[in-house]
Amino acid sequence: MATVTVSHKACTVNPLKMSQPIGGALAFLGLAQCMPMLHGSQGCTAFGLVLFVRHFRESIPLQTTAMNEVATVLGGLDNIGNAILNIQKRANPRIIGICSTGVTETKGDDVDGYLKSFQAAHPELDDLAVVYVSTPDFQDAFQDGWSKAVRNMVDSLVEPTAARVAGQVNFLLGSHLTVADIEELRDMAAAFGLRATFLPDISGSLDGHIPDDFSPNTLGGTGLDEIRTMGEAELTIAIGEQMRPAAEALARKTGQPYILLERLTGLEPNDQLLDCLAQLSDAPVPEKYRRQRSQLMDAMLDGHFHFGGKRIAIGAEPDLLWTLATWLTEMGAVVATAVTTTQSPLLEQMACQEVVIGDLEDLEARATDCDLLITHSHGRQAAEHLGIPFLRMGLPIFDRLGAAHRLTVGYRGTRDLLFEVGNLLMANTHEHHPESWPLPGGDHARSQIAVG
């Protein structure tokens, strides 16, 4: 059991966390033909836009209600209506996802009430789905914004039904999963003959492909029709504690059962996933996954010598922190320092003495005797100051290529991550030489042996 400590410094130094609206906007980027929009100033949207472009290295559709000082004080609801009409006219999306910001939340705009009256007054927009999520950036963090956005997608778009379609399964995906992770899960479901719906699915919209035609909206992702029929699935599999609210909302709306897997990095959680898919499909586990499991077990045997006793410092969102810390502990490493961004039920269950809700300054101060530092790209200076290896994990990663295509789930992803971390630890291991074992008598004794 870990003690959860909240940093109460006068200011944040080298921030670890990102804001809720950014997390919500990224979730909306996983929907097909969607236009995410931040209800706030242009600067808020520009920040998120730059962050996503640097991480994914893709063009990002993201709009704003362009609030100014006067609209903020007097109320900016008309800005929302004007933005929706302009977006519909120019981009013609099927979905508009609206995330609030600190500016509009402080004013207290009743966006939900306004949207009801606005849509009633504009019947020509009946085919347009509008999803609003309250994401004030003065509280909570990136993971919370993603979680709330997905829950609101379920509440607003999934149609209530008691029907069930054999072989259909839903995956609710946490913000810590990459494009490669989602593609691996899709391959797993297909290998069992299951029809899977992924929500949100950034593997279609942010996977780096070059489209044949330009689109002002997202280039792929979960379609509106797919979302509406998610209630017909036999089972929902939620990945990450942050997906529990969305899974519960889906269960309330459709009576659909769900299971929650807190992580998919490691041997045991992937055994659980494949066992679940095998039972759902009434089919045996394909031979390729049996072979991948065997490869992972061999890699664990090969690598555990280099993990044992190593002290690791991790700074990440709660679900990613839990994934990495639990897996590293299973490999024999010690999580000496854990820093995260927001509260989670998992924090007290961490296999370490303390979890700090703080910033990268807190991480650096506690990592002085560690063998490896793990966080996003903003931790590179801390690793340099400490003189220890650095593994980039999470978002943003802007100083390396291919962040979206790093695979960390499944037997194969766990094996690849094991090799990556193990090689970093091996490269930093002290290599002995003849001078490492001085003989009694010092230099004179050595010279006598050399002459003899």
Image: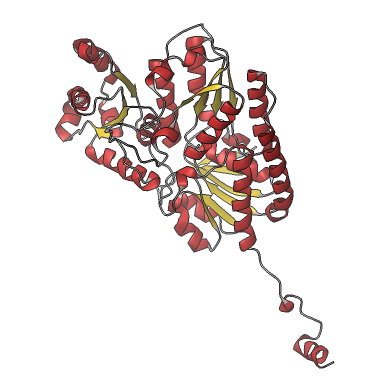
Q: Is residue 305 above or below residue 102?
A: below
Residue occupying image coordinates x 27% and y 36%:
214
21 or 396: which is nearer to us? 396
Q: Position of residue 10 (x, y in %)?
A: 39, 47
159 or 338: which is nearer to us? 159
Residue 373 appears in view: yes
Which quadrant of the structure image shows residue 349?
A: top right
Q: Position of residue 6 (x, y in %)?
A: 49, 40
Q: Position of residue 208 (x, y in %)?
A: 40, 42
Q: How many marks?
A: 0
Image check: 53 left or right of 74?
right
Q: Is residue 399 above or below residue 291?
A: below
Q: Position of residue 235 (x, y in %)?
A: 57, 17
Residue occupying image coordinates x 71% and y 75%:
433
Which color scheme is applied?
Answer: secondary structure
Q: Quadrant of the N terminus?
A: top right
Image check: 45 left or right of 397?
left
Residue occupying image coordinates x 30% and y 32%:
101
Q: Is residue 147 above or below residue 436?
A: above
Q: Is residue 61 above or below residue 116?
A: below
Q: Residue furthest right?
A: 452
Residue 11 appears in view: no
18 or 202: which is nearer to us? 202
Q: Residue furthest top?
A: 162
Q: Residue furthest bottom?
A: 451
Q: Quadrant of the C terminus?
A: bottom right
Which quadrant of the structure image shows residue 96?
A: top left
Image check: 202 left or right of 294?
left
Q: Residue furthest left?
A: 70
Residue occupying image coordinates x 53% and y 50%:
374
